[in-house]
Image: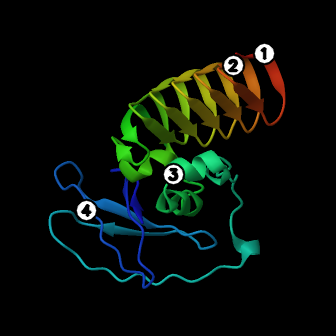
Amino acid sequence: MYESGQLVSTLTDINGFFRLRLRDNKYAHAELVISKQFYRDTVIFLRPGYDQQVTVPIAREKVSDLTPFVVTNKVEKTWVGKLFLSSKQIVQSLNLGDFFANKPVQMSLIPGLGTHGKMSGQVVNKLSLNLIAGYSAGMKGVELAGIANFDKGEVRGVQASGIANLVGGNVSGVQLAGIHNEDLDSLYGVQAGGSATRCGAASKGYSWRVL
């Protein structure tokens, strides 16, 4: 369950119950989206300002009837991703596979605890500042982290971290890490790590590691 304008989300329990807190001071209405892997998205409109209880039936669709989309959860399947990302964040990444937003700035302490909250994995940022570690859909600008940066999609610009960078899409620009850089797609630019660098596909640029 998510509200795209306010970038807030939650998961239902096994019975389908959920609770989502919406802001009521800036928006005339809320556009609540129910999204689940292998189901069609359902949208309902809510008026802010008071508590509401809604019941939304959903039906499973045939896989052949669903709109194809690019799977971008390669980062979440790695052992490093599983170490830093919670099971709820991984489930949400699968459910919201085709929803992405663009924002100018992200600031976070750890994945899920920052300016974009639980929706950080669905947001592409221009500037991302992560005190310990950050998790986003991608970056087009500058991304810095004390320990690690995790990006599901494409990274363009300068990315630097104290320990590790893990990117699921292409990297175009400069990527620096104190220990480890891992690009699950292609590198176009300069990459430097303290002990390990890895590209899953083509590499057009320079890559260094200091042992």
Q: Look at mark 2 in the image and give the residue it sits on.
A: 191
Q: Look at mark 4 in the image and give the residue it sits on.
A: 21
Point out residue 116 in the picture as x, y percentages from the top left corner. Answer: 37, 44
Mark before the other along the chain sequence, 2 or 4: 4
- Residue 107's image quarter? top left
Q: Are marks 2 and 1 in contact (CB under 8 Å)?
A: yes
Q: CA distance from mark 1 to mark 4?
A: 46 Å
Mark before the other along the chain sequence, 4 or 3: 4
Q: Residues within 10 Å of mark 3 (few under 14, many from 20)?
A: some
Q: Residues within 10 Å of mark 2 (few under 14, many from 20)?
A: many
Query: Residue, x 67% and y 49% (percent of image)?
Result: 78
Residue 102 visible, this orientation:
no
Q: CA distance from mark 4 to mark 3?
A: 23 Å
The image quadrant where one finds the C terminus is top right
Q: Nearer the viewer, residue 119 or 79?
A: 79
**Of the two numbered discs 2 and 4 in the rendering, the one whose residue sits closer to the viewer:** 2
Q: Amino acid at mark 4?
A: Arg
**Secondary-structure class at tag 3:** loop
Residue 82 visible, this orientation:
yes
Mark before the other along the chain sequence, 3 or 2: 3
Q: Residues within 10 Å of mark 4 (few under 14, many from 20)?
A: few
Mark before the other along the chain sequence, 2 or 1: 2
Q: Look at mark 1 in the image and give the residue it sits on.
A: 205
Mark before the other along the chain sequence, 1 or 3: 3
Q: Are marks 2 and 4 in contact (CB under 8 Å)?
A: no
Q: Is residue 113 above or below residue 188?
A: below
Q: CA distance from mark 3 to mark 2?
A: 24 Å
**Secondary-structure class at tag 2:** strand
Q: Look at mark 3 in the image and give the residue it sits on.
A: 85
Asked if residue 200 lies left or right of residue 7, the reply is: right
